[in-house]
Structures are given as structure tokens and as C-alpha cells.
Amino acid sequence: MMSKQADYQLLYQQALALFEGETDWIANASNLAALLYNGLADVNFAGFYRVQDGELILGPFQGQVACVHIAFGSGVCGTAAQMGKTQLVKDVHQFAGHIACDAASNSEIVVPIYQGDKLWGVLDIDSPKLARFDQEDQAGLERLAPLFLPGGGLL
């Protein structure tokens, strides 16, 4: 079995190959959501929320239906957006203000995505497993998250 670090390196290389020559963020975000949803174990949601009109709006994702509008500071996604810092939550039921879009979710990681110095949105990944995500996941996902944007991570 490969290490998490090796798994994320492989996902990174696969993402780069998928995005080669493609600048459409919707196509690339859709492919990245599918890559993460299918490439990570014990995941029941992988997707993006983008900043629009002062709130987070659902973007491309894989998984169960999801909340469409999330206010800054609300839930794990809104907290990550407001703080501009990755939120790694081992038990979402212990997170004050958690928004239960899918009752099966027990842990979550949300990575803010910047385009230049401006917050573009967040990458949100949920798991039915408690404490599914750790520092290795955080490092791997922070590297992968901006890749789908034109020039994202490739400047």
C-alpha cells in the first residue's frame, strides 16, 4: 500500500495531466472533484464553493446533493473562507455551527483557494469516517486545491 504522501503525489500528477491545455475552470474543477472523490478512500463529498456576491455558492462537486448558499463564518466552509485558513475537523458534530448538508458526514476538511491574493472559494471534502483527515491530507489538498484555476499553482 502506498503512503498518503505518495497517493497525493499521484493525484497531483493526474490532475496536471487532466488540466494540460484546458483553461476552463468549470471543466477543470469538475474533473478535480471527480479525481478526489474517486481517488480518496472514505469520502462522501468532494467539491468546490466559489465566492459570489459576498457568500459561498456551490460549484462542481461529486457526492450527495449539497447546500447551495453558505454565509461567510457559517459552518466549516464559511469559517475557512472567513479565516482564510484550512479547517481540519475530526468530528463535525463537535464543530459549533456545523451545517449538516449530508447527515452521513462525520469529518471534514475545507481548504481556502486563492487566485492571486483574492479568495476564490474553497475545496470541501467530507467523510462518513470520524477523524478521516490529518496533516498529510491537509498538505496534499492545499497543494491540489488551486490547480484547476488558470495558472493556479503553476505560476
Image (cartoon, helix red, strand yellow):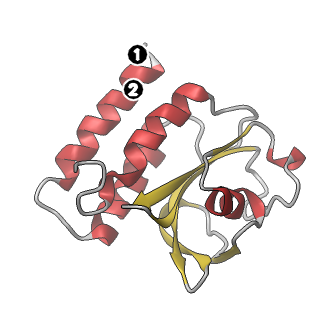
* Dot 1 and dot 2 residues touching (CB under 8 Å): yes
Q: Depth check: 46 or 137 in front?
A: 137
Q: Earlier in the sequence, mark 1 or mark 2?
A: 1
Side of 135 where 114 appears, left or right: left
Q: Is residue 25 above or below residue 52?
A: above
Side of 54 where 13 appears, left or right: left
Residue occupying image coordinates x 24% and y 71%? 24
Residue occupying image coordinates x 46% and y 42%? 142
The quadrant of the image that shows the N terminus is top left
Residue occupying image coordinates x 79% and y 57%? 103
What separation in Å lies between label 1 and label 2 (alpha carbons)? 6 Å
Tag 2, which secondary structure?
helix
Side of 113 where 89 appears, left or right: right
Residue occupying image coordinates x 72% and y 56%? 76
Q: Is residue 108 above or below residue 61?
A: above
Q: Residue farthest to the left?
A: 21
- Looking at the rendered structure, the kind of residue marked 1 is Met
Q: Which residue is mark 1?
A: 2
- Looking at the rendered structure, the kind of residue marked 2 is Asp
